[in-house]
Structures are given as structure tokens and as C-alpha cells.
Image (cartoon, rainbow, N blue to C red):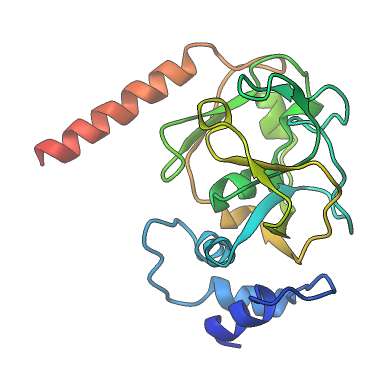
Amino acid sequence: MDVDSFIDRYFPKERSAETLRPTEQELDEIRNLTVNRGEYRSNMEWLLSKAVDRGYLLRGSPYLTEILQPYDYLGHGISAITTASYNQTISGVYASEYPQEALIYSFFRKYEVTPGLLLWGMVGDLVDPVYFMSNAVWEKRCGLGYIYVCPGDGFEKLPVSETRHTYVNRAEVKPACIIPVKFEDFKHEIFVAGNNFHVDFMLPRRIHKMIEEKKKARECA
């Protein structure tokens, strides 16, 4: 199956009543293709961006399910995040328009270790992010995860100043497509430092400095 046929079949413009599931063989063929990925680090990121181009949103999880249930931003199912614009807590199905963010959530679930502490985060922008995390989160990584390709209908975008790129649907969501992904599909840098309780608090600052130095070096080249 060529890429265009794959996109038309699994990310159709007319939503299918059933949840579509590509085969592992089809996905491996996509991984091995030579394509112009542009800003994307892996063929899987690039493929998922095509779903977003067609109006879908992406949710990553290590867990396989048929229906996505409303939870809070961290996945607890109880008190959700509060945003300045809404002035209320929001419980729902959270999704993103960024493939790389959906992918990292497919392999790591920060809230399961020690809620309320700095266990992971991101430095830079979502086009080319650098992630950091504690040893506890890294050790709980999954080699296989799932991307839920969700119809955009029913999702609302949260305030940019609070959540950058996040969408939420307050009702349960039936995915349009479920794509199994491998850890090798995630090509962004991950720095691991700290212990089982929190990230080394200086690590984000050091990564930010590293990014700025690389940026200056490119500008001077």
C-alpha cells in the first residue's frame, strides 16, 4: 500500500463508523519508506501529521482501549486542570495537534510515579522539542504504545497561554483509528537526570542553555 492510499484508507475525509486499525506490516512499510519528512524526525511523525492535516487530533497512551473516557489533564479522572480563561476545572479527553507530543505520551505516563513533583517536561518549542525526565519516569517507559486518531468534532482548544496546543472533549470519544507505535518512532532528545522523586532542578536550565548555544552557533556558521 502506498502512502496516499494509506492516508485515504485510515484518515478518511468521510469518517468511518468503525475504528480503523492498520496492520503491523502496513506500518512497517511506512517506516521504511523514503519520504520528504520536512521538519518531522521520523516517518511515523510525518504520517501522523497527515491525519492532523485532515482535521483529526492525536492522543497517545501506553494503554489499549476501545473508547477514550474523560479524565483530567494528568489522567486521574478527578480534579482537572484550571485555566484562567475558563476559571473552572475541565475533565475530558485531551488530545494534541502535534505528533511528537502524542508519541511521547504513548511511552511515558508521568502521573503514575509521584504526582505533584517535577517528573518530566520539555524545553524548546514543539516543532523541535528536547525532553527531560526523572529516572523513575524513564524506567517505566513502554516499548509499545498507541496513537488514537480522534475526529476533531467536539474538541475545543484550551487557552494558548495555559496549555499551548491542547484540545479537550468533555465527552467520551470513539477513535477513528488506532495506530500501534514503537519507541523507535520517537526521535527527539531525552535527557534523564534526577532520582525516583524529581528531576534535577538545574537540568531544564542547562538544556535551555545548550539549545541557545546551538542556535547561536548555527547563526554564526
Pick out the residue farthest to the front: 86
Q: Nearer the viewer, residue 155 or 94?
A: 155
Q: In which quarter of the image is residue 179?
A: bottom right
Please tell me whether residue 62 is drawn above or below residue 129 in the rendered image.
below
Q: Position of residue 36 (x, y in %)?
A: 38, 71
Please tell me whether residue 167 is drawn above or below residue 75 in the rendered image.
below
Q: Position of residue 113 (x, y in %)?
A: 78, 24
Q: Position of residue 190 (x, y in %)?
A: 52, 36
Q: Which residue appears at 79% of the width and 31% of the height?
A: 72
Residue 79 seen anywhere in this rendered image of the structure: yes
Q: Which residue appears at 84% of the width and 46% of the height?
A: 171
Please tell me whether residue 173 is drawn above or below residue 77 in the rendered image.
below
Pick out the residue farthest to the left: 220
Pick out the residue farthest to the top: 201
Q: Is residue 197 left or right of residue 6?
A: right
Q: Position of residue 47 (x, y in %)?
A: 55, 67
Q: Which residue appears at 25% of the width and 27% of the height?
A: 213
Q: Which residue appears at 69% of the width and 14% of the height?
A: 117
Q: Quadrant of residue 10?
A: bottom right
Q: Nearer the viewer, residue 183 or 104?
A: 104
Q: In which quarter of the image is the N terminus?
A: bottom right
Q: In this view, does 55 lie to the left or right of 143?
A: left
Please tell me whether residue 1 is drawn above or below residue 85 in the rendered image.
below
